[in-house]
Amino acid sequence: MTAAERPAGWPDRKPRLLLVDDQPVQLQALYRTLAGDYQLFMATNGEQALQVALQQQPDLILLDVVMEGLDGFGVLQRLRAQAQTPAIPVIFVTAHSDQDIESRCLEAGAVDFITKPINPAVVRARVRTHLTLKFQSDLLRSLAFVDGLTGVANRRRFDERLALEWARAQRHGHALSLLLVDVDHFKAYNDRYGHQAGDEALRRVAACLTEQMRRGTDLVARYGGEEFACLLPDTDSEQALALAQRIVEAVPLMAIPHSACPVAPVLTVSVGVATRRGPTQPGWSSAALLGLADAQLYEAKRLGRARACA
Ligand code: GH3
Ligand code: MG
Ligand code: MG
Ligand code: MG
């Protein structure tokens, strides 16, 4: 398939398909039907299918229903229960054509159903349709969690991750830190340079924050207007304050002129730091952590801005 023939929303690479059947003849028939347009992986039993799915992260699985040992229903159930494979769409392939089996397959969570002996044109069409649906829903999901202006995570994604990291920190007794970063005198910046320049400045601040993050688990999000939040799992208060200070220094180094700012002739930020320490702190919640970071941010503003408070 050339780039021009690729349906809208498809990635530039060949989609990855996992074909599962315990009969080599059936597997070969599927292989011949789909080779060329797709990167194909194969498995001849249920356990192997789960292993390959985990390792190769296929975009779609064609799964035989009747197999020795772990059958198609069992594989689907285990796929849905695994953290790394819950959303991979599955099309069941089976020789049974009675309606009972068909409804059972769909109830089990398969996106579609193909009967054997396979009709190559039907297989190709269904695979194409379900891949398109899959890629489009991936795209929508990613858009739903990204801030359109700055490209960092949006508030929805931040709220989700905060709840998750809070629960994790609680469970394991890990530290969790949070920074709230607010651009100083940004209303005056917009008034002086215009809203478009303001938007560009926000993009650059977001990029600067992202650059300062040290770990893959750190998250930068646009919290609202000209305010950003950095969520720092497994980070204690000292490390968090050090990072906050690096941010306070890095933003003015971009030298974005702000002649209307009474603090400095360049754009600066203030940062509030909050940390959830140790194993148990009764009465603590993620909302309390946010409240504390906000109070520290307010303190940084009160003390003259362009600084971090913890
Ligand atoms: P402070 O130092 O106390 O934070 O002062 P400030 O002027 O930054 O605070 P204030 O909350 O009064 O103003 C925030 C400004 O941020 C007002 C608003 O126009 C601007 N702003 C919020 N979101 C955006 C945006 O998406 N683009 C642009 N250009 N400006 C924005
Ligand atoms: Mg079979
Ligand atoms: Mg603000
Ligand atoms: Mg501000």
Image (tube, rainbow, N blue to C red):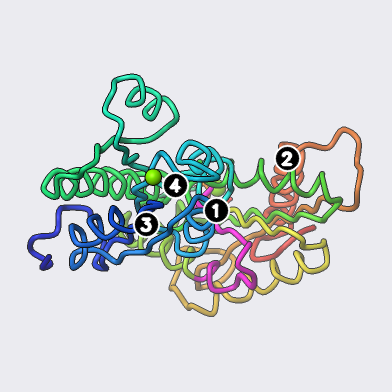
- Pointer 1 residue: 47
Give the amino acid type for the residue marked by disc 1 in the picture: Glu
Residue furthest to the top: 100
For label 2, count other residues whose C-alpha is less than 10 Å away and answer few (under 14), some (14-19) or many (20+).
some
Residue 52 percent across, percent down from the top left:
48, 61
Start and end of the magenta stretch? 208-226
Residue 57 percent across, percent down from the top left:
44, 59
Give the amino acid type for the residue marked by disc 4 in the picture: Phe
Q: Are marks 3 and 1 in contact (CB under 8 Å)?
A: no
SS under mark 2 = helix
Q: Are marks 2 and 3 in contact (CB under 8 Å)?
A: no
Quadrant of the image for the C terminus?
Answer: bottom right
Confirm whether the magenta stretch covers residue 210: yes
- Pointer 2 residue: 286
Give the amino acid type for the residue marked by disc 3 in the picture: Leu
Q: Earlier in the sequence, mark 3 or mark 4?
A: 3
- Pointer 4 residue: 145
Front position in the image: 287 or 174: 174
Residue furthest to the left: 4
What distance separates the C-alpha of mark 2 from that of mark 3?
41 Å
- Pointer 3 residue: 18
What distance separates the C-alpha of mark 3 from that of mark 1?
13 Å
**Is label 4 or label 2 in front?**
4
SS under mark 3 = strand
Front position in the image: 3 or 19: 19
For label 3, count other residues whose C-alpha is less than 10 Å away and answer few (under 14), some (14-19) or many (20+).
many
Confirm whether the magenta stretch covers residue 241: no
Q: Is residue 150 left or right of residue 168?
A: left
